[in-house]
Amino acid sequence: MVSVALPTGSLEEPTLELFRAAGLAVRKSSPRAYRASIDYPGVERVVFYKPREIPLIVADGTFDFGVTGADWIEETGAKIEVVHTFDYSKTTDTGWRVVLAVPADHPARSERDLGHGTRIATEYPTIAQDHFQRLGLRAEVIHSHGTTEAKIPELADAVMEVVETGSSLRQNNLRVLSTVRRCGVNLIASPAAWADRSVRASVETLTSLLRAAHAGAAHLLLTVVVPADRWTEVEPLLPARWWRLGGGGSDPRQEVVQGVFRKDRIAEAIAGLTRAGAVEIVETPIGKLASP
Ligand SMILES: Nc1ncnc2c1ncn2[C@@H]1O[C@H](COP(=O)(O)OP(=O)(O)OP(=O)(O)O)[C@@H](O)[C@H]1O
Ligand SMILES: O=P(O)(O)OC[C@H]1O[C@H](OP(=O)(O)OP(=O)(O)O)[C@H](O)[C@@H]1O
């Protein structure tokens, strides 16, 4: 049996969408309910927590499996098993950054231009202390509990903060001075769960379903019909994963192949295949894309 800790807040919606796509729909009695269920054999308990709390409650074995940000694993120092990393975040598929940001008109061009005693507001005091120690800068790290950008100028001179699209920084007239960490979403397991053959097997099954759903959402399947005399032009444009379906129904001189194409490159792929001589292209969404 596996117990699961899921994140509230910024990561909640994309995480629920991923679980749904994986066939692991998370059911709650109401949107504000924190206890939930997943109708999948072996999943016995599902509870929502703040991402910052999840590493430690997985580390101590309160939960076997969790979903949280890489930033909170580092900040808490939790001893957990990172089973897989995804690069999604609140609104994009590119992860997020923890950055050092200063007012737009600040004279500093790099971190090294910040003076000793600079006040840095952050939700990550441990990461910040470590960062400035390595830099040899005696900064004053101020623990912020949210709305960190608002701490400038009264309470801080700079912030160490999460950036995804950059919109919050712009709206608060701040600019990025440096990137401290690139972060993604981590699937984590407790050391006890990882050491138990049966719990580990369940964690690995859940992980492979989630990975397959994530990969499926990022790709499309193209079925491509190619006249035999254009094959040599089309073949180099096929992706790493492609296979032959055989000859075209009514015309044995046609090749019919299928390939798994990246969704974000699909327009150029279709244009290229058409130019190279494909006479029919059918695009199909992929539910899950599973490979070892
Ligand atoms: N675009 C994003 N904005 C904020 N956090 C993000 C974003 N993308 C991923 N995250 C992750 O989610 C965490 C924030 O979680 P959440 O939205 O619950 O905020 P919080 O600061 O913990 O709580 P609150 O919103 O109540 O202040 C970040 O620390 C980071 O790990
Ligand atoms: O680069 P962006 O796409 O704008 O996203 C990042 C912003 O979103 C988060 O704030 P959140 O809504 O969690 O509020 P908080 O600062 O009070 O935690 C984070 O703290 C940044 O301010």
Image: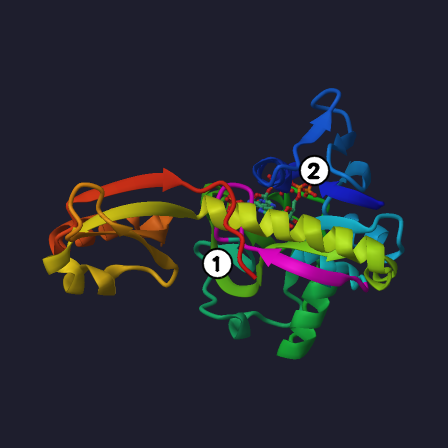
> Where on the picture, by quarter, is residue 118?
bottom right
Mark 1 and mark 2: Cα distance apart in space: 27 Å
Q: Secondary structure at mark 1?
A: strand
Mark 2 CB lies closer than 8 A to ligand 1:
yes
- The quadrant of the picture occupied by the N terminus is top right
**Looking at the image, residue 29 lies above or below residue 117:** above
- Give whichever of 12, 177 is nearer the camera: 12
- In magenta, the rendered stretch is 79-94
Q: Label 2 sits on what residue type?
A: Thr
The quarter in which the C terminus is drawn is bottom right
The residue carrying mark 1 is: 176
Query: Quarter of the picture for ligand 1?
Result: top right
Q: Which mark is residue 36?
A: none
**Residue at coordinates 69% horizontally, 51% vertically from top-left?**
205
Q: Which of these two is toward me, 40 or 37? A: 40
Residue closest to the eye, 186 or 236: 236
Q: Amino acid at mark 1?
A: Val
Q: Residues within 10 Å of mark 1 (few under 14, many from 20)?
A: many
The residue positioned 56% from the left and 69% from the top of the image is 114
Q: Position of residue 284 (x, y in %)?
A: 36, 39
Task: Look at mark 2 in the image and give the residue it sits on.
Answer: 8
